[in-house]
Amino acid sequence: MNDKLNFPKVVKEARKQLKLSQQELANELGVSFATINRWENGKTKPFKLAWKQFELFCEKMRVQGKEKYGK
């Protein structure tokens, strides 16, 4: 997932495919609801560690056959 320029779209699309609320995604990533909300609205960008956590989470979901967005 190299689409850092379109991170809000990537986060929202992945979350919708997984049928997760912003709070549920926040819990999965170990961040706050507000963080996910700001990411999706383009108000903030993730730090490198948060971006990596998101990538790893999406990869785990792809392996489990639950998420198709990204690579």
Image (spheres, helix red, strand yellow):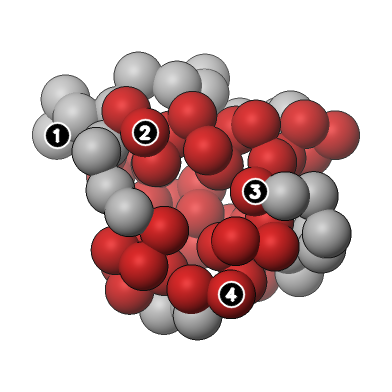
The alpha-carbon separation of the residues under discs 3 and 2 comes to 12 Å
The alpha-carbon separation of the residues under discs 2 and 1 comes to 16 Å
The kind of residue tagged 4 is Ala
- Quick one: label 3, few (<14), some, or many (20+) residues within 10 Å? many
The kind of residue tagged 1 is Gln
Point 32% across, 28% down: residue: 17
Q: Which residue is mark 1?
A: 64
Local SS, label 4: helix
Point 78% across, 38% down: residue: 4
Relative image position of residue 26 (x, y in whole percent): 41, 69
Earlier-in-chain disc, 4 versus 1: 4
The alpha-carbon separation of the residues under discs 1 and 3 comes to 24 Å
Local SS, label 1: loop
The alpha-carbon separation of the residues under discs 4 and 1 comes to 27 Å
Relative image position of residue 30 (x, y in whole percent): 41, 79
The kind of residue tagged 2 is Lys
On the rendered image, what quadrant is the N terminus found in? top right
Per the rendering, the mark at residue 16 is 2
